[in-house]
Amino acid sequence: MTGVVISVEVDAGTIRRGDQVVIGGQPFTVLEMTALPRGGKRLGFASGETFTMRRDTILWAAHRVDPRLRRWVRR
């Protein structure tokens, strides 16, 4: 995958497959996501571990973006 990596704040509605998050000092790469009731998501990581993200959980993630596309720029 090409592009640059930027650090963004994510919640259950904005996290994406391929994002890298740090939880408890450990880096994890999101491989799969399952929608949960009340807006939450269960994240499945490359390591085989899972994390339940509530609707109001905020994490920092590394997004890989293509700088030639303007859609990722927040205004």
Image: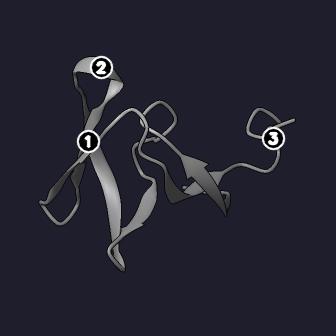
Q: Quadrant of residue 63?
A: bottom right
Q: Mark 2 points at which residue?
A: 38
Q: Cβ–Cβ below 8 Å for labels 1 and 3?
A: no
Dot 2 alpha-carbon crowd within 10 angstroms: few under 14, some 14 to 19, many 20 or more: few
Residue 47 at what x, y percent from top left?
Answer: 17, 66
How many angstroms separate mark 1 from mark 3 (CA)?
25 Å
Q: In this view, does 9 lie above or below 34?
A: below
Q: Quadrant of residue 36?
A: top left
Would residue 17 appear left or right of 3 to someone viewing this image?
Answer: left
As drawn, the residue found furthest toward the right would be 75
How many angstroms separate mark 1 from mark 2 (CA)?
19 Å
Q: Which amino acid is tagged 3?
A: Val
Q: Which amino acid is tagged 2?
A: Arg
* The disc label shown at residue 73, or none: 3
Q: Closer to the camera, 40 or 43?
A: 40
Q: Name the residue under label 1.
A: 32
